């Protein structure tokens, strides 16, 4: 892999991480913890490979290509990948004292997801070259970010909006569904115009993610405290 391709493989994940970092306006997370979250994302690739091997042996096989690809997209790929990220988010970051506002769920979930997506992107770009690098820069990597925002939104809500931690499982479900639809439409892209649904699912994910980011940012207790101090002046 040339240096240019390597840079292109890194660029989208880095850009998204910087965007989320600067969107965290009220109480930024420690850089060491963000770096650790990214590292967890790298580790989640290994967990994904282990789970994929196990799932491949137990998932049912159907002759109908639509059913077969749906099972592969939603269970063999989406559930396995999102669960691998979810485990690191819930076990290692959810209990952390720095996870102290709803928006932090989004921040940490995105950092984990970008670790996963960046390593995945490097592998794809190394094999596919410039065309794959440019295509994934505007599709697959942003898609992973939207899945993460959805997962992190519910994790943040679970911790700070008087909901049980099990509520975060809804985030895993929502991320898996969006990821599954995105991959499913790609897997059956041989059907005329189906690939357009992949684009629609990505755009829908971006719109919903932007709303989730705005809602948790506005709900930050640090923002509310700043506003109260301002009002007292």
Image: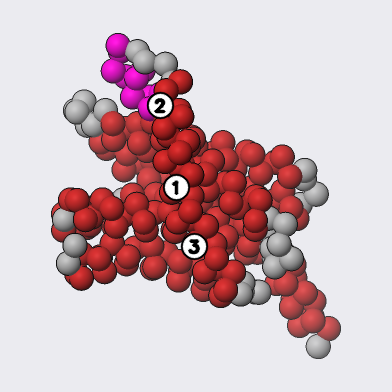
Which corner quadrant holds the C terminus?
Answer: bottom right
Q: Quick one: SS at disc 3? A: helix
Residue under circle 2? 56
Q: Are marks 3 and 1 in contact (CB under 8 Å)?
A: no
Residue under circle 3? 38
- What segment carries the magenta color? 63-72
The prevailing secondary structure element of the residues shown in magenta is helix
Circle 2 packing at 10 Å, graded few (<14), some (14-19), many (20+), is few
Residue 129 coordinates in the image, percent (x, y)? 16, 55
Colour scheme of this structure image?
Answer: secondary structure
Residue 206 coordinates in the image, percent (x, y)? 43, 51
Magenta includes 16? no
Residue under circle 1? 46
List the single residue furthest toward the right.
232
N-terminal label among 2 and 1: 1
Residue 190 against residue 12 in the figure, above or below = above
178 relative position to 32: left or right: left
Exactly how many numbered labels are in the figure?
A: 3
Residue 77 coordinates in the image, percent (x, y)? 41, 35
Q: Quadrant of residue 179?
A: top left
106 relative position to 226: left or right: left
- Distance, label 2 to label 1, CA atoms, is 15 Å
């Amino acid at each position: 892999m040339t240096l240019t391709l390597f840079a292109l493989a890194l660029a989208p994940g880095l850009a998204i991480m910087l965007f989320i970092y600067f969107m965290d306006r009220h109480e930024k997370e420690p850089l060491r913890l963000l770096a650790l979250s990214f590292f967890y994302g790298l580790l989640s690739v290994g967990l994904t490979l282990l789970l994929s091997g196990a799932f491949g042996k137990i998932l049912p096989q159907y002759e109908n290509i639509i059913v077969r690809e749906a099972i592969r997209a939603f269970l063999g790929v989406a559930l396995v990948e999102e669960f691998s990220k979810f485990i690191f988010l819930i076990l290692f970051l959810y209990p952390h004292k720095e996870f102290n506002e709803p928006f932090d769920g989004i921040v940490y979930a995105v950092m984990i997801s970008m670790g996963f997506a960046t390593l995945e992107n490097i592998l794809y770009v190394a094999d596919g070259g410039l065309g794959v690098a440019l295509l994934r820069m505007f599709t697959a990597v942003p898609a992973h970010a939207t899945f993460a925002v959805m997962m992190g939104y519910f994790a943040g809500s679970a911790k700070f909006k008087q909901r049980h931690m099990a509520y975060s499982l809804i985030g895993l479900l929502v991320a898996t569904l969006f990821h599954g639809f995105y991959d499913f439409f790609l897997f059956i892209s041989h059907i005329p115009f189906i690939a357009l649904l992949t684009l629609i699912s990505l755009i829908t994910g971006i719109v919903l993610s932007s709303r989730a980011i705005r809602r948790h940012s506005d709900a930050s207790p640090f923002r509310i405290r700043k506003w109260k101090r301002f009002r007292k002046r």
